[in-house]
Image (cartoon, grey):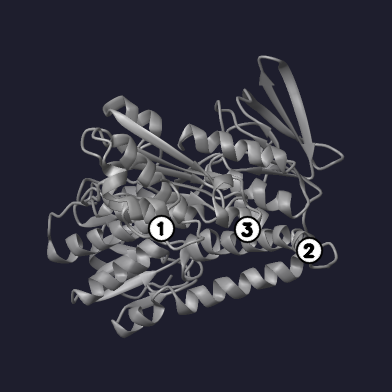
Amino acid sequence: MTSSPPEPFDVVVVGAGPAGVTAALRTARLGATTALITRDQFGGMAANDGPVPVRTLAQAARLIREARQLPRYGIEGSEPALDYPRLMARVREVTAATREQTLLRGDLERAGVRIYEQAGLARFADDHTVESDNAPRLRADKIILCTGGTSRPLPVPGFELTATHSDAWNLSSVPSSMVVIGAGATGVQVASIFNAFGSRVHLIEVAPRILMTEDRDISEAVAAALAASGVQVVEDAGTIDRFERCAAGVRLLRSSANGQQSIEAALAVVAAGWVADTAGLALDRAGVQTSQRGFVEVDAQLRTTAPHIFAAGDVTGRAMVVHEAVRQALLAGTNAVLGANAALPAQVSPVGSFTDPEYASVGLTEAAARQAHETAVTTVRFDSLPRPIIDGRQTGFCKLVVDREHHAILGCHVVGERAVELAQLAATAMAAQMPVEQLALVPFSFPTYASALGRAAVIAAIDLDHTGLWVLDHLETAVETGVA
């Protein structure tokens, strides 16, 4: 930080993850002089500590799994052995390439955005000025906060003995044992990946089931698959009392209806939720308020309680996935420069996780749909489809939830190989407002995982046809999908 006058801009964007990059590019292309400042490396959590490194580790776990299938296909080979330092070198290689090649850095530079990287902690000096330790002071008419999120700490004794998922990705070796506290998307991914790498894993969830925000069938199927692979899944785990040191590394003590239990492991990873990364921003100097959960409060136009300051992405606590952060950033950038009052339109938003097996969903869960609609639910099991059988990946299903009155697709829930891609296909159909009969008429290549979605749509179309003529009218399509 210097004492010289601040550099003037029309817009300063704080944070260079997907939201920050998108917001900065949008404002610059709208003609605003724009600065983008980030505490650490360009790319933010998504590139350096989120989907990109996680998917790279998941790919290693996948390759180990596939290598163990080689004898089933007549291919001789030795048991795969993991060289963890070499894997981490690959993770660094991938994240570096992502930062340089796929996160619009060249577009930002061509648009004239001034990028301040490795600037240290950014904070408000006043309501229009941002300062940091390693960059000039920046002053702007409009400011957009895109600082993302961070792991939620647990208010229990001994928490300092635990690690976060970020620490897990940066280990120098695979721990012999691990206890993961929190079985949302992040915790389940950590458990699945390190189980594949050879750790003995306990997965602890205080809620009644893992993946509580997902459809119940997804939760149950993923829990069963994790247990079958050797993960010790503990649901409805009671209260986390404390952590303490022990010979193995760290001991977790919890209390439930069965009394107090303890689990010892070389490493304890806490993945108990996500909070806004606003520490040190000095929001009070700018008049920006946060909610009780610590997220920056924004209105429908993504304005904060300071009208010239906007926010987008995980820092708002809304739909904390990359594609939603990008949507919010486009809106925040547009409203900031043009003084517009646009709001985000409703849109389907698929979510998924690279566990083994994968899971993904879009739209309403079956339980939520039944509360507001008369529904038709169809499920196609992967072990009934040629492609999963060919690949030896029969675990899983594709479930469609459809409105009986309007025949609209309300939700799709998938467990198994290529689940994320399948949910994306369903999201495309839902965004296009295709009735299920129209999806059923889309030709799906054979043999593919995508045909699970096509078959589920055909079954739903037949179920919804009160005349009994749907199959006759579309017999050729039905035969090709193997339903008639």
Residue that mark 1 sits on: 322
- Dot 3, crowdedness within 10 Å: few (<14), some or many (≥20)? few
Answer whether labels 2 and 1 touch (C-beta < 8 Å). Answer: no
Q: Nearer the viewer, residue 140 or 110?
A: 110
C-alpha distance separating marks 3 and 2: 26 Å
Picture coordinates of residue 63, whole percent (x, y) = 69, 63
In this orientation, does residue 28 appear?
yes
Q: Nearer the viewer, residue 200 or 44?
A: 200
Residue that mark 3 sits on: 390
The three-letter amino acid code for the residue at tag 1 is Val
Comes first in the chain, label 3 or label 1: 1
Secondary element under disc 3, as helix, strand or loop, is helix
Answer whether labels 3 and 2 touch (C-beta < 8 Å). Answer: no
Picture coordinates of residue 411, whole percent (x, y) = 36, 41
Q: Quadrant of residue 268?
A: top right
Residue that mark 2 sits on: 82
Give the vertical position of 222 relative to 341 (above or below).
above
Picture coordinates of residue 121, whole percent (x, y) = 47, 61
